[in-house]
Structures are given as structure tokens and as C-alpha cells.
Image: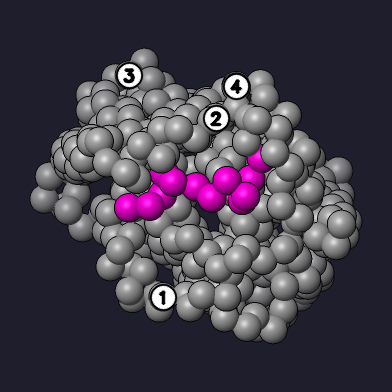
Amino acid sequence: MSGETNNPAAAPQATGAQPRTAGAASPDSAATVPGDLRMARLLWPFMLASAVGLVPFTIYSTFLVPIADESGAGVAALGQLRGLGGLAALAVGSALAPLIDRVRREWAAAAGLAVLAASAALGASGDFLLLAAFCLLVGAGTAVLNPALTAAAADRFDNDAAAGRAATLITATQSLTALLAAPLVALPALVWGWRGDLWAIAALCSVLALYFLLRGRRKARPGAETEAADKTEHPGYVESFRLLGTLPGVVPLVLVAMLRTAAFMGYLAYLAAFYDERFGLAPGPFAMVWTLSGTSFFLGNLFAGRLLSAERARISAERLMTLALVVALAALVSVFFTRSLWLSLPLTALVGAAHATVAACVTTLLVRRCGSLRGTALSVNAAGMSFGVFCGAGLGGAGLALGGFAGTAAALGGLTLVALVLARVVARSSTH
């Protein structure tokens, strides 16, 4: 695997070399991008680990009521514990971001999976304090696992288009898992309960952690490729942040991701309440709306990544991101003002697809622009999105309290509008 041998021209090094111009194609960027099936055959361990990383919290959310009964705490108390995961992801992702580029991706992934295995084992106890530890550890583990897997997948390919496509395949896998995980964990639970689900995930994470650990050790054996990689100078901890900030458009890209996530997660937080009040949809029928939103997000992420990796892409990632934010803004605001169920449904699908497209564009641009600092960039980006999740529900709720669903539309639409302005800053940076 050639992931650890990064092209020195692709990103700034500790020696002070200047980054390549943002948006400029790398020398091999015109190389043919492998098809999705071929990529999946190469990346399946990363895709599997990425999918597994989302399951612990899916189990927690799906079985919140029986877990609350077992712990002796209320549903509200356990629901609030879920927020600890977001705070842990923010803290750990920010603190460890530069280290993602200083250790082998496989070892970072193994560490994240080991933490998830430990967290699942603790959660299976049903004790309230251990469930709090479960939430903290899941947030911390995924903060390391997700950027390590995304960067490792991108590192498997030498040209920008293929690297960006590989990264978006990992994020598409995550969105598909978010859509399918609930029924997949509910069926085995009929046999062994929610505790059995957690023990199964603990075992699977342990096996995957061992796989990535051994994979990393194989790559660490002496050889020409490894020796070349070992000679690569890595910037220091603080210097990594400074160099990342000097890359054209990277800071506004991270802000776009944070604001987009805040708007989308705030929108999802109150979508069920909106459909209930406006159209009288009970939780059962609303599950179809949730499936519609999740499916559109997955397809938007998948096809946007494919479009951006095309040998002769008809639209740049910067322009596609701007267009998608315009659509996301219009659709999100329109959803909360529509009075027709049959109009709100396609708008709901449009919101999901537009936000997924923006997410794919951000991932692609970070991979292309950051080169050997892509692990740091993706980790900072994940931390920023965790902060966005934390802020989105709060701002959406404040808008709802002050002005009803029109207030929610104004608050979340405002976040999307600021993201749109920053997207234009990103687009201008590609010309300098």
C-alpha cells in the first residue's frame, strides 16, 4: 500500500516547502480513476471499519428505552449522555489532529477500534456511570477512527481524483450505515437482546483492530517504500496547525463543513416535530420520511463523489459545492413553510441530497488541497462537524421557541447562508 509515501509536492513539509497552488492538478491527476467496484475491493477493510464505527451509538439510540429501564435512569438522562460523545469527539479530534499524520493510518485505526471495543463492553453492563463512559469513549474512538480511515483510503491512490473518490466512498459507506444500521441491529437483538448487540460489536471491533494492527506491522517491515516514508519530515504539533491554516481555502472549508452540519443536524432534530404538527404524521409513518431523507443523503454523497472523480469533470468541486448550498438553503427554508405533504416530501429529499453533495465536495477538496496533511485536516474537520452537531440543535430550538418553525427556518437558513458566503471564499482561493 502506497499510502504512507506521500508526494512531497502535494503539501507543505516541515522544511518550509510551499504548498502547491490550490485547485491545480497534480501531475498524475489525469490518470484513470478505478471504478467503484474495483475501489471497493481494495478498500473493503476501511469501509467495513467505517460502518462498524457508527453501530455503537445506533444500538444506544435504538434501544434507549430498555437501556434506560435497565440502568434505573430516565430516558431524558440517558439521552443527555449522548451529547457527551459529541463533546469527546470535539476535544479528542482537535487535540489529536496533527498526530493522525505522524503515525501509520492503520495503527490509528486500530487504536480507534480498540477504544470502541472497550466502550461496547462497558455499555453492555447497563450501569449508568459505565454508560456515561460508553458515550465518552465512543465519541473519542470515532474521532480517531473516521479521519484515519478516510485518509488511509485516499492514500491508497496517487492521483487527486482517485484519492478524493476513495475518501467519499468511505463517507458514503457511513451514510448508508446510518440508514440501514437500525434494522440490522434490531433483528439480532430479537435473539440476544441489546446487550448481545454490544458484545457482538465489541468482538467485531477487536478483530478489526487486530487486523489493522497486523497490517500496520507488515508495512513497518524494512523495505524501499518504508524507508522512503520514514525519511519524510513531519512538522511539529503546533506547526501542523499553522501549516494547515496557510493552505488556500482550508480554513473556510472546515467552517463550511461545521455550518452545514449545524444546519442539517438542527433540521433533522425538529423534522419529526414539524411533520407531526403540520401533517399529523405519527412516528410509524414518519419513519418513511426518515428513510427518504437518509436514502437521498446516501445517493447524493455517492453520486457527487463519482461526479467529482470523473476523468473530465464537467463542474469543479468548488462550483458544485456552491450550487449545492444554494439548493440546500432554498429547500430547507421551503420545507418549514410548505403546507402540502406532497411538496414537503420532495423538498425533504432535496435537502438531504444537497447537504450530502456539500459534504462530498468538502471531503474531496480537503484531500486534494492538503496532501500529506490530509489526516490533520480531516481530523480537524470531523471535530468541527461534532461542534456543529452540538450547536445545530440548540440554534434550531432557539428559533423554534422564538418564532415557531419559521424561526427554525430563519436560524438554520442563516447558518447555510454564511456557509454559502464561505464557499465563495473557497472558490476564489482556487484561482490564487
Q: Secondary structure at mark 4?
A: helix
Q: Amino acid at mark 2?
A: His
Q: Position of residue 286 (x, y in %)?
A: 51, 66
**Nearer to us in this view, 147 or 297:** 147
Residue at which label 4 appears: 237
Q: Earlier in the sequence, mark 1 or mark 3?
A: 1
Q: Residues within 10 Å of mark 1 (few under 14, many from 20)?
A: some
Kindly tell me whether residue 217 is visible in this rendering: yes
Q: Earlier in the sequence, mark 4 or mark 1?
A: 1
**Principal secondary structure, stretch drawn in magenta:** loop
**Nearer to us in this view, 420 or 134:** 420
Image depth: mark 4 or mark 2 in front: 2
The Cα–Cα distance between marks 2 and 1, rounded to whole angstroms, is 30 Å
Image depth: mark 3 or mark 2 in front: 2
The Cα–Cα distance between marks 4 and 1, rounded to whole angstroms, is 35 Å
**Nearer to us in this view, 74 or 429:** 429
Q: Dividing the image into 4 quarters, which one contains the C terminus? A: bottom right
Q: Amino acid at mark 1?
A: Pro
Q: Residues within 10 Å of mark 2 (few under 14, many from 20)?
A: some
Residue at which label 2 appears: 234
Q: Which residues are magenta?
A: 1-12
Residue at which label 3 appears: 130
Q: Position of residue 297 (x, y in %)?
A: 55, 67
Residues at circles 4 and 2 in contact by the CB criterion of under 8 Å: no
Is the residue 85 above or below the residue 312 in the image? above
Residue at which label 1 appears: 34
- In the picture as drawn, the residue positioned furthest to the left comes out as 191
